[in-house]
């Protein structure tokens, strides 16, 4: 999946779970803060986990995810990205364009200069 497909998939799931309520901007910020807090816990806990083969069976996959991926550094980084991409779709932000422009700008920026 490309970034736009991931964002649309994530937004569809978030909407399915009614994550945005009546104040989508507030809900997006609150969820990102929650995920950053979970990332901090995973990093300080050195919880890097490992990755078993995923089962095609959804119940087995869910159990495996909860045991090996949930609350890990990788899992929480993914949660932050998923939350941000879904939120971008919810707010009508062309996130792929913003990412491309941000990458270009960062490459052109001069660091460690006055
Ligand atoms: Mg999380």
Image (tube, rainbow, N blue to C red):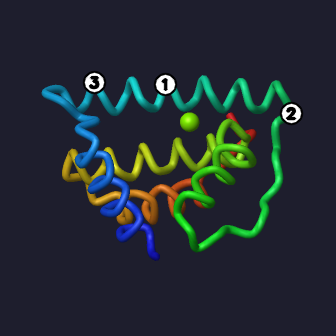
- Point out residue 19 in the picture as x, y percentages from the top left corner: 28, 36
Mark 3 falls on what kind of element?
helix
Q: Is residue 17 left or right of residue 30?
A: left
Please tell me which residue lies in front, 102 or 78.
78
Outermost residue, right side? 46
Mark 1 falls on what kind of element?
helix
Please tell me which residue lies in front, 101 or 41.
41
Residue 71 lies in quadrant: top right
Residue pointed to by mark 2: 46
Q: Earlier in the sequence, mark 2 or mark 3?
A: 3
How much space separates mark 2 and mark 3, taking CA atoms? 30 Å
Mark 1 neighbour density, 10 Å: few (under 14) some (14–19) many (20 or more): few
How much space separates mark 2 and mark 1, taking CA atoms? 20 Å
- Point out residue 16 in the picture as x, y percentages from the top left corner: 24, 48
Mark 2 falls on what kind of element?
loop
Residue pointed to by mark 1: 33
């Amino acid at each position: 999946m490309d970034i736009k497909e991931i964002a649309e998939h994530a937004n569809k799931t978030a909407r399915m779970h009614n994550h945005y309520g009546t104040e989508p901007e507030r809900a997006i910020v609150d969820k990102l803060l929650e995920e950053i807090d979970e990332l901090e816990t995973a990093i300080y806990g050195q919880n890097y986990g490992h990755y078993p083969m995923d089962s095609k069976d959804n119940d087995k996959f869910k159990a495996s995810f909860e045991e090996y991926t949930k609350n890990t550094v990788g899992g929480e980084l993914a949660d932050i990205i998923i939350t941000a991409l879904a939120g971008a779709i919810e707010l009508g932000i062309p996130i792929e364009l913003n990412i491309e422009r941000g990458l270009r700008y960062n490459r052109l920026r001069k660091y460690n200069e006055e």
